Amino acid sequence: MIDMTPTSSTPKAKRPRPQVMKLTEAAATRIVELTKRADSEIVGLRVGVKNGGCAGQSYTVEYAHEVRPTDEVVEDKGVKILVDPKAVLFLLGTEMDYKADRMQAQFIFNNPNQIGACGCGESVQLKPADVEG
């Protein structure tokens, strides 16, 4: 017979949930500029990861017109980033930056989960974040 009486053990304290991503000042400034320039009303930028490229994956950044129920909402430095739920484990701990020079302007992802990249820099190899420890 199984004893179903409750035990008096203390429940474990929940660990605070880390923010998926953070932004540099340059990235936040650029997102504000893009938001103001958008043709239609947007709520922020949606960031994700898609399969493709010679290293296997690439980052995606697009206008977000609505917050989806499954989006991970990141608010940092006054701007809103919506992280695709399929990308959360790949982006956990990432810092999103923005760099512009005479040749190009782009968002840069300083990602601790990136384990490789192709020579041209268009695609990356990512591993899921270690959330156990």
Image (cartoon, rainbow, N blue to C red):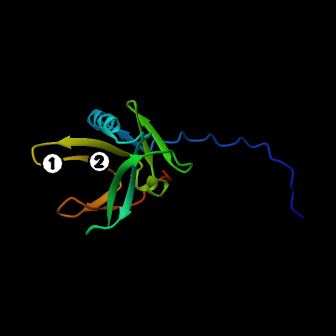
Between 18 and 130, the one lying in front of the other is 18
Check the image and report above or below for 101 versus 1: above
Measuring from the top left, give residue 39's x and y in whole percent. Answer: 35, 42
**Disc number for residue 55:** none
Q: Is residue 87 left or right of residue 110?
A: right
Check the image and report above or below for 102 versus 123: above
Crowding near the residue tagged with mark 1, few <14, some 14–19, many ≥20 C-alpha atoms within 10 Å: few
- Residue at 32% x, 50% y: name it: 111
Q: Is residue 20 left or right of residue 105?
A: right
Between 48 and 110, the one lying in front of the other is 48
Q: Which residue is mark 1?
A: 104
Between 131 and 118, the one lying in front of the other is 118
Measuring from the top left, give residue 76's x and y in whole percent. Answer: 40, 34
- Residue at 86% x, 61% y: name it: 2
Kind of residue at badge 1: Gln
The quadrant where residue 78 appears = top left
Which corner quadrant holds the N terminus? bottom right
Measuring from the top left, give residue 24's x and y in whole percent. Answer: 30, 36
Measuring from the top left, give residue 118's x and y in whole percent. Answer: 22, 64
- Residue at 26% x, 46% y: name it: 107
Circles 2 and 1, Cβ within 8 Å, touching? The answer is no
Q: Which residue is mark 2?
A: 110
- Residue at 83% x, 48% y: name it: 6
Query: Mark 1: which secondary structure?
Result: loop
Q: Residue 55: in sight, yes or no?
A: yes
